[in-house]
């Protein structure tokens, strides 16, 4: 006879799936932040478990710094095609060109510039909720 006891990871997974379903049910325009990194890959897998076999109910938003390895973007694009999701990409380079983000003189990292780029995308698409993945 099998046990109905959930181990720690199963409990966390179940909780995350429940939260995702509630977010999609309660918000009008939610999205998932998806970079293609390990945290967002895990988040995407949880979303698949939450919504499959139905159509993917929310878009994926990627704020691209332009400093990723090409393989990361190839993986991101391939994964999005596999699950037939909508991918929205906004780039820091585009935000700089439009005056949305302003680099400081000599600034090499684009991490700080992702913030105004993200905020502009939220406003453009009128997202009312973003789901992001981070380690505990």
Image (spheres, helix red, strand yellow):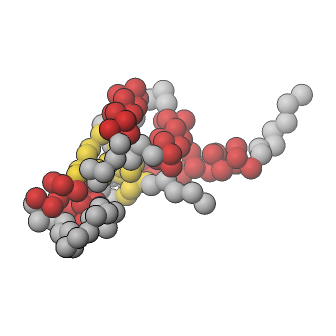
* Residue 123 position (above or below residue 70): below
Task: In the displayed orientation, state which residue is furthest to the left.
Answer: 98
* Residue 86 position (above or below residue 128): above
Find residue 83 and report its image quarter: top left
Of residues 58 and 45, which is closer to you in this image? 45
Task: In the displayed orientation, state which residue is furthest to the bottom.
Answer: 104
* Residue at 11%, 65% in the rendered image: 99
Instruction: Decide if residue 7 is on the left or right side of residue 89.
Output: right
* Residue at 49%, 53% in the rendered image: 133
Give coordinates of residue 109: x percent, y percent. Answer: 31, 63
* Residue 125 position (above or below residue 100): above
Give coordinates of residue 17: x percent, y percent. Answer: 56, 45
Instruction: Decide if residue 117 is on the left or right side of residue 61.
Output: left
Instruction: Decide if residue 79 is on the left or right side of residue 38.
Output: left
**Quarter containing the N terminus:** top right
Of residues 93 and 132, which is closer to you in this image? 93
Q: Is residue 80 visible?
A: no
* Residue at 49%, 30% in the rendered image: 52
Q: Can residue 70 be seen in this view?
A: yes
Find residue 98 and report its image quarter: bottom left
* Residue at 18%, 69% in the rendered image: 102
Give coordinates of residue 120: x percent, y percent. Answer: 21, 61
Of residues 33 and 20, which is closer to you in this image? 33
């Amino acid at each position: 006879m099998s046990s109905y006891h959930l181990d720690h990871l199963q409990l966390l997974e179940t909780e995350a799936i429940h939260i995702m379903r509630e977010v999609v049910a309660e918000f009008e325009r939610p999205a998932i932040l998806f970079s293609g990194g390990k945290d967002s890959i895990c988040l995407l897998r949880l979303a698949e478990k939450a919504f499959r076999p139905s159509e993917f109910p929310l878009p994926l938003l990627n704020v691209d710094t332009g400093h990723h390895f090409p393989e990361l973007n190839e993986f991101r694009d391939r994964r999005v095609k596999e699950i037939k999701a909508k991918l929205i990409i906004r780039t820091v380079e585009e935000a700089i060109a439009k005056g949305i983000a302003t680099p400081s003189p000599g600034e090499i990292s684009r991490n700080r510039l992702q913030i105004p780029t993200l905020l502009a995308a939220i406003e453009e698409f009128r997202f009312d909720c973003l789901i992001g993945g981070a380690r505990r």
